[in-house]
Image: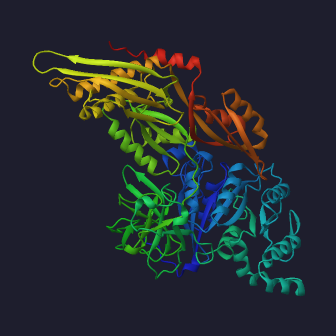
Amino acid sequence: MPVAAHESVQAVRTLALVGPAASGKTTLAEALLHHTGAITTHGSVERGTTVSDHDQLEVKAQHSLQSSLMHLTHAGCRIHLIDTPGSVDFIGQSLAALEAVETAAIVLNASSGIEPMAQRMLEYAGERQLDCLIIVNQIDAQDADLPSLLTDIQQAFGKKCLPLNLPDAGATKVVDCFYNREGHSDFGDVADAHRALVEQVVEVDGEFVDRYLNEGDVDASELHAPLERALREGHLIPVCFVSARSEAGVAELLDIIVKLLPNPTEGNPPEFLIDKGSRGNASSTPGSGSRSESAFRVMHAQPDPAAHVLAHVFKISIDPYVGKLAFVRVHQGTITPGTQLYIGDKRKPFKVGHLFLQQGKNHIEVGSAGPGDICTIGKIDDLHFDAVLHDAPEDDNIHLKPLPFPVAVHGIAIEPKRRGDEQRMWEIVAKLVSEDPCLRIEHLPITNETVVYGLGELHLRALLERLRDVHKFDVATRPPRIAYRESITAPAAAQYRHKKQSGGAGQFGEVHLRVEPLPRGAGFEFVDQVKGGTIPGQFMPAVEKGVREALAEGVIAGFPVQDVRVIVHEGKHHPVDSKEIAFVTAGKRAFQSAIREAKPVVLEPVARIQITAPESAMGAITGDLSSRRGMVSGTDSDRLGQVTITGQAPMAELADYQSRLNAMTSGQGRYALALAHYEVAPPAVQQQLTREHQAPVDD
């Protein structure tokens, strides 16, 4: 049944529940839905009956694996709510959800306190200039020390974190501190908390500061504008208390959302970037590596329902039965069924068919979506994550400022268990990867492997389970092969004559060449020093082709050869029998012979590694890195007790690093890798790889 359109943009609130696993985000979303009558029964994570954890794998795992969209109505306002996963392996879903909301609600478990995921999400929300709200959940837990937790919050994130309400009656209810000037709570008198809030808010407005100093107080009902400014500027991060299971504080949280949190006209709008140069150039997308952000002009959408449309796809979901769904946040204009929309710089528009609001897995059809609304559009194949949707062709050069997604470095090689299914495997996995901005798939020509990369073992395990259980496709897995290389350490020379005569026209070609080592990372050089026409010019490309074939195949261990210069200086040809194929073969064989005499070596890739973890784990991490033939180049600590360790280590030593890092940091560490350079592998490694290859030597 269609949902009635809200009266105005001011009656919309958007909220993402983010934070660590087991903080109760899904249960809190269930309590909010139940309290407002959006659902009649309070579902349970343990029973698999919640609105947001509707996926069969989430029911099995009993925790969120994807972000889920819901909506509810309270006091005349439509509230769009996004429940996000708490595991760091699925942080991409949480980061993407921040692009669709005005407020990031960081949910803490009252017993567990401040966890790294909460710190990270608060930092990310601050970088995107979102309003922030801290929700302390499970306040009625027996081991919860709520006053100490509030102190910890203020020490970790600053004195700007002030309670909007406080637990009362043994955490069975909460009492408001913003509108109430007096009263009692489990923490003591409400007056002190009220005074601290008012003083923090009025600081952003000189007129209210003067009134406060002269009158001693200001009525909180007059502070809406300065409150919104304090939230926008990060001058205030409200804290509120709730128990999702007992629903203590749920009604008060809903009132806070409606009365105090921003509508789309009050929050900081996201930064869209307009290409200053050529329009319609997909390669000029910011963050693509081709151009810097200085080539773009910042633009902010206007939350005006009558303006031209500007919307953003922040999530893609592909169901094997329903098809592709795009989750869209409307920032400007109004979308209705029949609206013609362009996707980024594409010249051909698509027509919106049905428009839906999501209630978990359920689709509720609506007649329009305006600024602040979060809706879904289905069955448009060209829609993709991070696409900007617009209804004006001249807006084809608008992009959203790129998100700082963690780089997926934990890889696993996959292949179909049934031969001939390679293409189908690629298509299915590519669809799954398109749903998660922190997954990627690559075919590595060097090792001839298809490798899927994620943020950790749990991340990849969820993908493989979805592949098997949802798409009914089985794959074999193994660790990816290391992309070793070969090179030389000394000059050498060789020659090879290819002669073939079997009746009729024959084949003849002779090549004399030298090889010389180049500096690491220099690549390959081919030099033609032939004089006197001993190898006619038309055959030199064939010689180079043969050399490049040998480069790609390797000589001693089957890995590509690099950092070598090849100088062809002499040869012979036959006026009748010389053909390109003869010089391809001669060039290849001469190069292989020369390499074997040039003191060849196997090179291993060395990675730059950046590790972020609790400072208490620094000793274990640096010691472990040294045991892996690595070296630490620097460390940097922050005020939140996190340390960033930079260094280098051979890629072969980092195959199982995520598991080891989890063990050293209790799952709180993360890392990023980038190729630094290649260097000579240890003798034992070289000998093993050479033996395994057993390359045949041609006569």
Q: Residue at x 75, y 33 (%)?
A: 620
The quadrant of the image that shows the N terminus is bottom left
Left or right: residue 104 compared with residue 596:
right
Give percent across and percent down for residue 218.
Answer: 82, 83
Vertical relation: 580 (above or below) 457:
above
Q: Residue at x 87, y 63 (%)?
A: 187
Left or right: residue 331 compared with residue 611:
left
517 and 177: which is toward the camera: 517
Vertical relation: 688 (above or below) 546:
above
Give percent across and percent down for residue 494.
Answer: 38, 19
198 and 366: which is toward the camera: 198
Q: Is residue 13 visible?
A: yes
Q: Residue at x 56, y 60 (%)?
A: 97
Give percent across and percent down for residue 294.
Answer: 55, 65
Q: Residue at x 64, y 57 (%)?
A: 18
Q: Is residue 336 visible?
A: no
Q: Quadrant of residue 662?
A: top right
Q: Quadrant of residue 660?
A: top right
Left or right: residue 559 compared with residue 144:
left
The quadrant of the image that shows the C terminus is top left
521 and 316: which is toward the camera: 521
Give percent across and percent down for residue 174.
Answer: 78, 66
